[in-house]
Amino acid sequence: MREIQFREALREAMQEEMRRDSSIFLMGEEVAEYNGAYKVSQGMLEEFGAKRIIDTPIAELGFTGIGIGAAMNGLRPIIEFMTFNFSLVAIDQIINSAAKMMSMSGGQYSVPIVFRGPTGNAGMLSSQHSQNFENWYANTPGLKVVIPSNPADAKGLLKSSIRDNDPVIFCESELMYGDKGEVPEGEYTLPIGIAHTVQEGSDVTLVSFGKMMKVAYAAAAEVAKDGISVEVIDLRTVRPIDYDTIVKSVKKTNRLVVIEEAWPLGAISSEITYHIQRFAFDYLDAPILRVNNADLPLPYAPTLIEEILPTVPKAVKAIKKVLYKD
């Protein structure tokens, strides 16, 4: 099977969907003439023209509102944020218009729109450009929140997101755009809301999503050297969350560790912890542990970033602790 970059998988998804459906267009800062800030939309202006690949001013509130209005009137916009940190400028439109319009209109208006771009830490970008917002948006009824961890999932999930009739928050990572992975040729989609058990195991369940899956894989491989068998689950989406897959796994392994690049208060890992203690408490042989960011704004210095973010050693320590081996 061929290997392509994460950015190329995203581009293929958008190109294929735009060829299939003329109502789809891409809009955002630098998506056209510059080929995208991260070159995700490279070549798309040449293929689809300026009416469907639209450069905008640095005005997230404005072009987000335009996109939502277009979606309400029968088009299917893809809105690219250069980073989800900038989506805060448009969060009123996303939450108070896109997410609520179906309910407020009594079902008369759907808003088939995708908001996509990178989330989280991407190196030395300091506090205002390094936050995670997937848990913020997952708190909002009416939105779906998708976070792929590899190129194949990125393509299949983005195609499904574009076809969905609800607004979708599609979170990527600057640190993953160059990642290569096997991506099937031809048409395929992946369902929103279904987690993927990427590795079977018997001793502990390890749950994560997005680029933190790299930490999960590395931690599972590290503890395997000590004979510890880890079941690894990639959530893929955090609204809806596939609770059933996690519960089924915990009933087998009796232990759970969740890795999430976000602050601990009100996190996706908090919600998973509550759900498992509610529906699989009798199967737990140890308290659930979370590996989150430290409860601090992300600094600029690389050494301090390392201290704050989830890392492989921190995940290994948590895995061993729930097995009472630490």
Image (cartoon, rainbow, N blue to C red):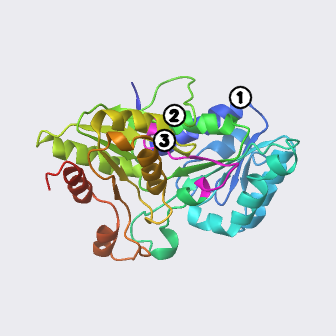
Residue at the far front in the pictured view: 282
Q: Amino acid at mark 2?
A: Ile
Mark identifier at residue 20? 1
Looking at marks 2 and 3 on the same chain, the residue that comes earlier in the sequence is marked by 2
Whether residue 4 can be seen here = no
Mark 2 and mark 1 residues within 8 Å of each other at the beta carbon: no
Mark identifier at residue 194? 2
Can you tell which of label 3 and label 1 is closer to the viewer? 3
Q: Residue at x 33, y 77 (%)?
A: 301
Q: Amino acid at mark 3?
A: Arg
Q: Which residue is mark 3?
A: 236
Q: Left or right: where does residue 238 sit relative to residue 222?
A: right
Q: Is residue 128 magenta?
A: no
212 lies above or below 306:
above
Mark 2–mark 3 Cα distance, whole angstroms, equals 7 Å
Mark 2 and mark 3 residues within 8 Å of each other at the beta carbon: yes
Q: Which residue is more in the foreground, 279 or 248? A: 279
184 lies above or below 174:
above
Q: Which residue is more in the foreground, 28 or 44? A: 28
